Amino acid sequence: MTNLEEIAKKGKEASIKAMLLNSDLKNEVLFKIAQNLETSKDFILSANEKDLADAKKMLENNEISKSAYNRLKLDENKLKDMVQGVSDISKLEDLVNKTLWKKELAEGIELHKVACPIGLIGVIFEARPDVISQISALAIKSSNAVVLKGGSEAKNTNTAIFEVINNTLKSFPGFPEGFISLVYTREDVSEMLKLDKYFDLIIPRGSNSLVKFIKENTKIPVLGHSDGICHIYIDETADINKVLKICTDAKCQYPSACNSVETILINKKVVSDILPKLCEELKNNGVLIKGDKTCLETVLGIESATEADWKTEYGEKVVSIKCVEGLDEAIEHINLYGSHHTDAIITENKGNAEKFMLMVDSAGVYHNISTRFADGFRYGFGAEVGISTNKTHARGPVGIEGLMIYKYKLYGSGDIVSDFTTHKRSFTHKTIN
């Protein structure tokens, strides 16, 4: 049985030692990991084939969803993205110990706000083996130690990728032992959630039930999102060509992703003009469409949507469509049923676009662009540890900046508070450029 507490203790110690790692060493490690992942391609893909064979049986027995099976699968392109992601992270600015601002409190007293790592992070994820390389690379660059717990359906692939990364770390004597660890069982998760003495943050990446369980069973701060119920609102001034391109991409480019659109809202003034063309385009791409009463009256051959559909993350080629009176009803619907992940408006009216982006309460609000852009790699973060719908600390795709916190450093020369309370000295509170 895994001694999770010992792993966490070593990880915590490693996170403190990692504060001394210089940027050149971290970048060299990342460059070598990228190289080794590329040369270990056959080894990783072979491990993934074993997982896929087992997962196929689970899919046939309805033990996992089609979207989970799709997320599990690695191919040449995904491996190239993994390698590229690690390489890109090596080129990002190192934020550790970066001074964010300086202030003179009084003559001879300086206060510095300085970026620092969060510490030891536990990441619990399902069916996404490429997460290991993303999170490990971000952890190395940000000097955060990490304990990874992947889904059992990806055990062989997770182990293969972890071995490549861990063996690379071991080849650098200056890297602290226990900086990255991989655990496997549900018991490890339960134990991890109890260890608030060591873990500073838990990041879950998976189903709504997983995230809910974690939030309800730990005192450790949790960063993440449960659902990815993303919307696109088609405004009355929407360009039909943009509508067809954006909606098709947002639903079909990778339906299993959490930033895939699940509900499309359409202004009633353009339903008769746009909806038939949109439905035809989506059907041609294999999408099952569910619609409200107005949609059913406008287009034949679509299913009836229920109240439950507005609350559903399909994770496959299914989309629900609802007719709304206008912008205000669209915003109200999204804030009521959405998961505060990513929502978009298609319109040529800049005023409507700005109102939508101001009033929709989501981590990502988009104008005339696919929701599939909600991604750390596409944002230029190199990769992401996940997407947060939280309103504290980090929001949206969480990259290097989201893995940093800050501390205050105060420099003096024998100064005491009594001098200020007795008015011998006074504060200046000047910003230092």
Image (cartoon, grey):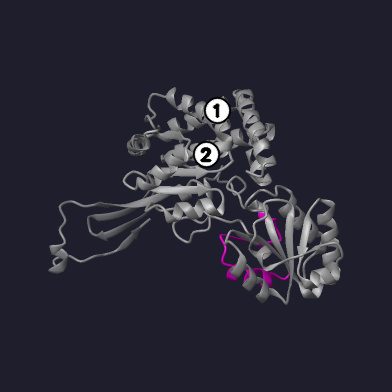
Helix, strand or loop under label 2: loop
Please tell me whether residue 425 belongs to the stretch shown in magenta.
Answer: no
Q: Position of residue 252 (x, y in %)?
A: 74, 50
User: Considering only vertical position in the picture, is 375 above or below 340?
Assistant: above
Q: Is residue 162 left or right of residue 377?
A: left
Q: What's the amino acid at mark 2?
A: Gly
Which region shows up in magenta? 344-371
Label 2 sits on residue: 150
Classify residue 377 as left or right of residue 177. Answer: right
Splitting the image into 4 quarters, where does residue 343 fall?
Answer: bottom right
Q: Quadrant of the N terminus?
A: top left
Q: Quadrant of the C terminus?
A: bottom left
Q: Which residue is drawn at 47% across and 48% down?
A: 203
Query: Where residue 108 appears, x then y in whole percent?
Result: 22, 55
- The residue lying at 56 percent from left, 51 percent from top is 207
Residue 330's spot in the image, x, y percent?
67, 71
Q: Mark 2 vs mark 1: which is more N-terminal?
A: 2
SS at circle 1: helix
**Which residue matches tag 1?**
160
Residue drawn 55% across and 28% down? 160
Instruction: Determine the residue positioned at 78% across, 74% down.
Output: 268
Direction from residue 317 to residue 281 in the image, left or right: right
How many tags in the picture?
2
What residue type is disc 1 on?
Answer: Ala
- Of residue 206 and residue 243, the one placed in the foreground of this image is 206
Residue 44 visible, this orientation: yes
Q: Quick check: can you spot residue 366?
A: no
